[in-house]
């Protein structure tokens, strides 16, 4: 299986925390791309992709993909499984998962305690974190 | 609820302050070890310590006094990321060095490295100034959220993935002066 370039990455962020993360990267002049590639993780016997993973950000200066999730720790089993599958199928690709707690800690560190609930939203959400 | 003794000897309370992670004695001992290691590595040279304001203030002061080699000191400060209402554009230097780094052996001193954003921004600025060498010494390393790869030559402690205050680490500019490092729960903070 090979990664697939997304020729037309989304122009809007799927979640407010992603927009905030992009603003943080811009602040420190760290280049980034939003959802530039999709990594197939499983195929059916006909070669159709049945499972795939599209990390939120790619930082070219670090050759690093970053996935953000705002779900509760107990609800990110599926995402952790995809990260594990990524490491199995694409061991040369670096991926970092920042979870809800990481987001909270980062926002508090930057003095954004009041903004935190609006930015990280409902921890039980199904598709809120893209 | 925990208490701390102010310089005036009065007791002051601070909601949210938790268990001590690194005591004053542990900090003192580790700084002495770092001072000895750095003095050995830079023997025969003059070292330029560059403190990153404001967090590195206490660590820098202690470390500099633990060195047995000649050293000079300067400071840098960078604008802070924050809410859109008071953060505009990109990071910028609020305080630049007064001394030239040209052909000097420079050691950047910071109290904690987390994502690596701030330090990488400053390292890019410092590398352009042609120092003879440029290394980093951090008191606390928290690599779990590291997004920018940084060569950290000297590390005090590998820090837990928790919110902490003291020894330069503050919350809303407070509690930096604690002589120890303690856990802190921002949700329990005094309003």
Image (cartoon, coloured by chain):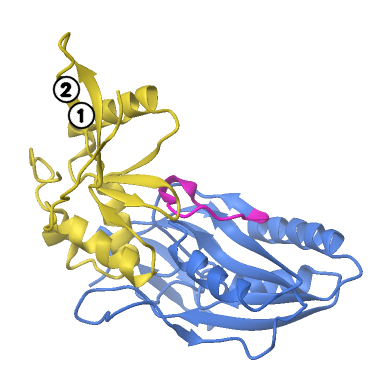
Q: Circle 1 sits in a helix, a strand or a loop, which is it? A: strand
Above or below, B14 relative to B78: above
Contact check, label 1 and label 2, Cβ < 8 Å: yes
Classify residue A91 by image quadrant. top left
Q: Is residue A74 visible?
A: yes
Name of the residue lying farthest toward the right? B44
Residue B155 shown left or right of residue A58 in the figure:
right
The image position of residue B152, as x and y in percent, is: 62, 55
Residue B8 in the image, given as x and y percentages of width and height: 53, 84
The chain painted yellow is: A
- Quadrant of residue A93 within the rendered picture: top left
Residue A20 magenta-drawn? no
What chain is tagged by disc 2? A
Viewer-proximal residue among A108 and A8: A8
Q: Of circles 1 and 2, which is in front?
A: 2
Tag 1 subunit = A
Q: Colour of chain B?
A: blue
């Amino acid at each position: 299986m090979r990664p697939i370039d997304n020729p037309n990455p989304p122009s809007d962020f799927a979640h407010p925390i992603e927009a905030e993360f992009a603003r943080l990267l811009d602040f420190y002049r760290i280049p980034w791309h939003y959802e530039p590639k999709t990594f197939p993780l499983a195929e059916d016997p006909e070669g159709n992709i049945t499972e795939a993973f599209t990390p939120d950000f790619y930082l070219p200066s670090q050759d690093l993909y970053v996935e953000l999730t705002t779900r509760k720790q107990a609800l990110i089993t599926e995402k952790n499984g995809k990260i594990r599958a990524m490491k199995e199928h694409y061991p040369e690709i670096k991926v970092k998962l920042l979870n809800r707690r990481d987001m909270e800690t980062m926002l508090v560190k930057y003095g954004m305690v009041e903004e935190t609930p609006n930015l990280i939203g409902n921890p039980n959400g199904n598709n809120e974190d893209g | 609820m925990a208490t701390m003794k102010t310089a005036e000897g009065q007791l002051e309370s601070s909601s949210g302050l938790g268990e001590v992670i690194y005591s004053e004695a542990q900090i003192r001992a580790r700084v002495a070890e770092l001072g000895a290691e750095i003095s050995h590595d830079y023997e025969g040279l003059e070292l330029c310590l560059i403190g990153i304001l404001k967090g590195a203030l206490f660590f820098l002061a202690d470390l500099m006094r633990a060195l047995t080699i000649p050293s000079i000191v300067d400071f840098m400060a960078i604008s802070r990321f924050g809410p859109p209402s008071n953060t505009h554009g990109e990071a910028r230097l609020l305080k630049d060095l007064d001394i030239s780094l040209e052909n000097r052996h420079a050691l950047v001193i910071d109290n904690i490295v987390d994502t690596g954003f701030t330090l990488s921004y400053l390292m890019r600025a410092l590398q352009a100034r042609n120092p003879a060498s440029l290394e980093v010494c951090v008191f606390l390393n928290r690599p779990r959220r590291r997004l920018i790869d940084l060569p950290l030559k000297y590390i005090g402690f590998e820090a837990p993935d928790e919110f902490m205050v003291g020894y330069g680490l503050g919350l809303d500019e407070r509690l930096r002066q604690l002589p120890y490092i303690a856990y802190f729960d921002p949700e329990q903070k005094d309003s």
